[in-house]
Every structure is written in C-alpha cells, then in structure tokens.
Amino acid sequence: MITKSAAILAAAMLLGGCSTSLDHQLQTNDRNYEVSWSSDPSPIPVNDFFTLEVEVRRDGELLTDGELSVDAAMPHHNHGMNHVPLIERTGPGRWHVEDMLFHMPGYWELYFDVRDRGVTHRAQEPLEVD
Ligand SMILES: [Cu+2]
C-alpha cells in the first residue's frame, strides 16, 4: 500500500509540474487571483474535522503580501459552520487551515477571501457533501 501511495503521489506531482500538487483550482470572481486548495481527508467528510492547504497566486506569482480568510456556508439553509477555522500562513502565498467542520450533508459553498491592497477578492467552490 505504501508503494502504491508513493506512486500515486509521484504521478500527482508530475501532473502538477512545478506549480502545485493541490487538486482544486479556482479563480476569484474578478479573475485576478488563482486559488488552489486541497482537503485532508479528501473528499471532505460530513461531521468530521478536516484541514485545508491553500495557495494563492496573482498573475501566476505567489501572493507574498496579502491575507486569506476561509469560511463556508449552506446557502440554501442560511447557515454557516459552527466552528471558526484557524488559519495560519505557512509560506509565501500558502496557508494551512484547521478546525473546518461541515456538520450536515448537502450543498455547501467554500469561500476563500483574498485581501490584497485593501480590497477583498472572493473565490468560491460549490461542494455536494454526503
Ligand atoms: Cu444545513
């Protein structure tokens, strides 16, 4: 199993090239920033904590001077998460997020708000979780 996992990881790194191994790619709604993310575990579970790795780029370059916040909601139910996520910058353009919890199955939206030069730019991911 270890060998198989290592092979899959190596393949993923090859496919990702030198940019990133994060498996979801988004753009902010104004298309000015690229947000890449992956969850652990993946796919995102119901009613169990998960973490995120997030990378943000502007014009292809890692964002060194901006801030990121992450949130999630079930828009059809008019509620968000019951936990406030912990977000830590781990490198240039790179963040680690803990304490994420989707407490019920259904349609969620994951929000990445990039604050740069005094303006907030949102990227969002629609997710069906069950
Ligand atoms: Cu709900």
Image (cartoon, rainbow, N blue to C red):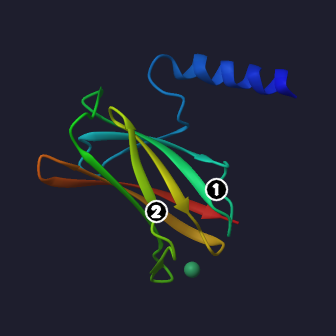
Give the side of residue 43 with respect to residue 38, left or right: right
Is 59 drawn above or below residue 49 in the view shown?
above
Q: Nearer the viewer, mark 2 or mark 1?
A: 2
Looking at numbered disc 2 in the image, what kind of residue is underneath it? Pro
The residue singled out by tag 2 in the image is 85
Q: Residue at x 67, y 19 (%)?
A: 11
Q: Residue at x 24, y 29 (%)?
A: 59
Sequence-wise, the earlier of marks 2 and 1 is 1
Q: Residue at x 47, y 71 (%)?
A: 73
The image position of residue 113, as x and y in percent, is: 31, 55
Looking at numbered disc 1 in the image, what kind of residue is underneath it? Ile
The image position of residue 3, as x and y in percent, is: 83, 20
Q: What secondary structure is found at the residue carrying circle 1?
A: loop
The image position of residue 34, as x and y in percent, is: 34, 38
Find residue 112 and report its image quarter.
Answer: bottom left
Give the side of residue 75 with respect to residue 61, left or right: right
Viewer-proximal residue, 44 or 99? 99
Furthest residue toward left: 118
The residue singled out by tag 1 in the image is 44
The image position of residue 117, as x and y in percent, is: 12, 46
Name the quadrant where ligand 1 sits.
bottom right
Counting other residues with Cα less than 10 Å from the Cα at mark 1, is it few (<14), some (14-19), or many (20 or more)?
many
